[in-house]
Image (cartoon, rainbow, N blue to C red):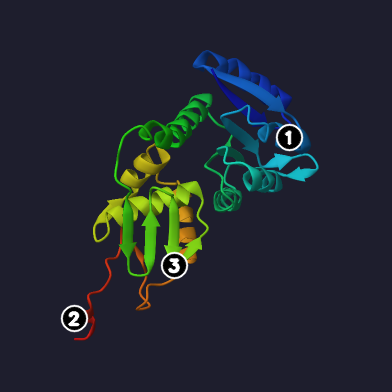
Amino acid sequence: MSRILVIDDDRELCELLTDYLKPEGLDVEPAFDAGRGIERALSGEHSLVVLDVMLPGASGFDVLRRIKDKSAIPVLMLTARGDEVDRIVGLEMGADDYLPKPFNPRELVARIRAIQRRTAQPAAAAPEKQPAARIVLDDVELDSSTRTVAKCGKLLDFTAIEFNFLEELMKMAGRVVTRMDLSRKVLGRAVSSYDRSIDVHISSIRRKLGPAPDGAERIKTVRSVGYIYALPQRKDNADQ
């Protein structure tokens, strides 16, 4: 049974989640304050953390930062409905997903399952003998075997989700990747028309990579469709 840590001061909500998630094979441990939540999140006894943005006497973002500084445990943040700023900030700080309150428990289970599938993929693929995937486009090099991204030989700091998004785009360089395909492959779920999570991650990736050597944008938005990682411009074309 997977063990989930819920950091939320709403005791009634924690009880409801415990009752709902247990039949789904998810054991819930509640933590009602930031200090206890951080301590338990770093214990290595859980597979995922559900973290509320609003905690008494502390910011959920500070809790997220302290967890992510020392652990790779997936974190799903609970945010106030309609508060887009909280969702964007959480994703930029390394949260794996978010869910606005109030929410349907079935959707919470779906989000948890999607994160579990996504984080379990590297372990499942390990026994297979596969050649190291290395993609080089202009001055950017992505190495799937070490899960690193370098620009001009200098390593860049990417979150796990950002790396996955960039890998999908670079593998398909020169071709449009739809938002739906990106969401299913990276987030493990369908994307809704109001979901900004992909946009936030792509924006962060663009900022970290910066422009291409010729000054052009590396990842272009195809309006109402998705994104495309631009192929490097051939020198013979550039000289014309």
Q: Position of residue 19 (x, y in %)?
A: 60, 15
Q: Which residue is mark 2?
A: 236
- The mark closer to the camera, 1 or 3, is 3
Q: Nearer the viewer, residue 137 or 217?
A: 137
- The amino acid type, in three-letter code, at marker 1 is Glu
- The mark closer to the camera, 3 or 2, is 3
Q: Nearer the viewer, residue 223 or 2?
A: 2
Q: Nearer the viewer, residue 51 or 119?
A: 119
Q: Which residue is mark 3?
A: 153
- Distance from the alpha carbon under mark 3 to that under mark 2: 25 Å
Residue visible at 73% across and 34% down in the picture: 39
Please identify the quarter of the rendering in which residue 55 is found. top right
Question: Quick one: SS at disc 3?
Answer: loop
Please identify the quarter of the rendering in which residue 54 is found. top right
Question: Quick one: SS at disc 1?
Answer: helix
Q: Residues within 10 Å of mark 1 (few under 14, many from 20)?
A: few
Q: Which residue is mark 1?
A: 39
